[in-house]
Image: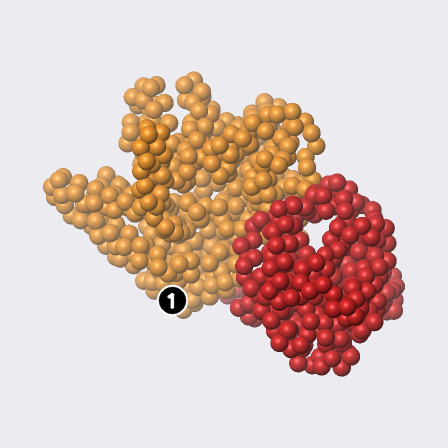
Chain colours: A orange, B red
Amino acid sequence: MLFNSLSFAIFLPIVFILYWFATRGNLRLQNTLLLVSSCFFYACWDWRFMFLLIFSTVLDYYTGIKIHEATKQRNKMFWFWLSIGFNLGFLGVFKYYNFFAQSFADGLLLLGFKANLGSLQVILPVGISFYTFHGLSYVIDLYKNRIKPERDFVNYSVFVSFFPLLVAGPIERATHLLPQILRKREFDYSKAADGLRQVLWGLFKKVVIADNCAEYANTIFNNSPEYSGSTLVLGALFFTFQIYCDFSGYSDIALGTARLFGIELLRNFAFPYFSRDIAEFWRRWHISLSSWFKDYLYIPLGGSKGGMWMKIRNTFIIFLASGFWHGANWTFIVWGILNALYIMPSIIFNTHRNNLDIVAKGRYLPTIKDFFAIGITFSLTVFAWIFFRASNVTHAFNYISEIFSSSLFSLPQGEAFIGTVHPITMVCMISIFFIIEWLGREQQYAIAHLGANWGKPARWGMYFAIIIAIYWFDGKEQDFIYFQF
Amino acid sequence: MKKFILQVLIFLSIPLIIILLLDIFIRNKNTLYEEKYKGAITYKDSIEIIILGNSHANYGVNPNAFNLFAFNLATPNQSIYFDKRITNSLIPYLTKTKYVFISVDYHSLYFQSQGDRDIWSYYGNHIKYKESDYLLANISPSLFGYSLKVSVSLFLKTIKNNVKYGNDIIDFDVEDGVNLNDTISKGFISFEGSDESTFTIDSYKSRSNAFSNTIRTSDEKDEIVADLDSFIEILLAKNITPILFTSPTYSEFNKYLDQSIINENDQEIKNICQKYKIQYWNFMNSDWFLKKDYYNTDHLNKMGALKFSKMLNDSLNNLKVNGGNKGYL
């Protein structure tokens, strides 16, 4: 059930009305309803993978209690590693088996041995990377005595499978979400209205910007040998907007939907394309994953405490892990390494925490220095996305080598830009979107306060304009990119 | 809570009223599909030749050029899947039909669904695509059938045309290039003149790429060939002679088409023709057609259509008199 589908448009109001009316504020009933709805939501994708989700939930719930109850460190460790082993095992089998088998066979072939390890014809269960990381954070936090186990299975299951975040995050923490699940929730008009507004903005990003950019980006990346350098640059730019609007659009819908139920999810994006350096970009892009890796990998590895080399090594490890988390393909690993290389100068010269504030805060325009810094960071990001989008590393290198050829200075080829929306219209839409994002960069999401001081007719007019744009410029429906992870 | 729901309902009522009005307009709007279907029923006792196919045949074959009573049932983007089912639904009423012209163009063997037009066509001739139920499209045609964009465009275009030309114009939507003062005759409507902007290398490339991409990303060919095969069997069983044909397309544009796909198509059609001993008339690269005969890269205009239709008629007369060449030409 896609967020931008009619079935979700029917599903959400039904659950919303039952949640606030039928449960009459009874927390137990509310959580049970959320769990049933989440199971239904997930089963709509593929009911067979429900068993995997249920197993993973039961495992973490049970081992969590056992870890807490264990009096001996040995027992504690046993339950801890049992949970970690199963969680990573599932992820390994479903997501990485084919990659490892193929890479191993390729490696042997280089040494002159031919190995046929076979491949598993498995479909990647949707959301496995996300709910596995939920479970892992819960178990690790328990093991580290940061939290107490949740003994109510319904409450714990809602934490793992709450439908807005189930298939593509944000990756929640028990310390943040569980207390909200346990707390009595009252309806709040302004929060609900804010939630709807964020859902609307997320839909605009996904349907208008991401799906239309995808049409151009897909044509160009899928037929890249036929196109000039200038066309390929535009292809990379369209993909840059596609992936941002696709994923942040999804996150906006997830956050907005959760807010309708009185639950605040972790923020996942904070206008990353206005970052002035790569370190800032990574504090603003897929925040829930970056902070997950920081808390559960970077810091346990020693973080920045062990001197420069330790810092460099750990930074490389988390970027490699981040790349690998995205998928079983060398392209993601190269993308991760590239980002590690980007960030390295700021780690070495200790400038990675220079830009902690919001760019041009309180002003309409950035300084010239900020403007160039944003431009450079954005260009580096676009370059890295080529690896992320390419079908394999060779494809990415061929793509890049064509960009740096003389054809870069030729006019882009018109035939690459055949989509639902005319490319000029698309550029206008992206420009308007960019301006709105810039003006709203101090808020949680771009239109959070847009129109707050306007009269109702004007504000509603703006919402209608967004709705019309969603219907008018809707591109060919594309799956959310992060569903594959 | 109640205030919130009330506000949401008030907010939604405005677009809902607009959609309701659009639905009323759309449900009452005549379409090319309806016009053709109704026309076929009107002339059911006269039709001797049916012309099927996509826009190439829709704009390219003028039934008035035939000695026998012909009727054009082709519509833009119509696939063989729909050719077959539309014909099957009409055949019980068409007592005189002797020939069915089936258009097989560069991309005909590679697509079954007509995309959005599946629903548009369904409104006119009631043929569903595969397992689709069109439940939502029946509830709100403007939202789930035509889409809001198309519905509003249709609405605005109708108003604009009525203001500009009055009511004495064709009352269904046609593509740019068709004279609105023209009348549909035996299911045929044509393009006037030529759209010079389409006769450019960029245009040839983008159009041919669009076709080639459809072909390269398709895995439906076997299914479509089997469908065509069974369609021919059905026609032959009813003593109706199927004739496969390919419409002319502009020679400069043809240079950008993939020769391997053309060869593959030829082989496929040859196999079918040999199997059933039926005719295939390929005019794709015919030297008889000059730039002035085309409206754009791959569609004939009124003049070109008349020329082409006369040639089809001559070939048919030749077939009737001499028996023609049996099998693939």
Q: Is the residue marked by circle 1 packed among few (<14), some (14-19), or many (20+) residues within 10 Å?
A: some
Q: Is residue B322 left or right of residue B106?
A: right
- Quarter holding residue B152: bottom right
* Residue at the image position 41 percent from the left and 64 percent from the top: A19
Residue B116: give x, y in percent of width and height: 63, 60
Which image quadrant for residue A382? top right
Can residue B56 be seen? yes
Q: Position of residue A60 (x, y in %)?
A: 25, 50
Q: How many marks?
A: 1
Which of these two is toward me, A311 or B178? B178
Judge left or right: residue A235 versus residue A389. right
For the point 49% across and 55% down, the residue is A3
Disc 1 element: loop
Instruction: Judge from the rendering whether residue B211 lies leftward or rightward of residue A160; answer left or right.
Output: right
Q: Chain of mark 1?
A: A
Label 1, on which residue?
Answer: A23
In the visual, does B102 lie left or right of B181?
left
Q: Quadrant of residue B171?
A: bottom right
Can residue B185 be seen by looking at this rendering?
A: no
Residue type, mark 1 in image: Thr
Question: Residue B36: horizontal and vertical position, in percent?
Answer: 74, 71
Quadrant (top left/top right/bottom left/bottom right) for the C terminus of chain A: top left
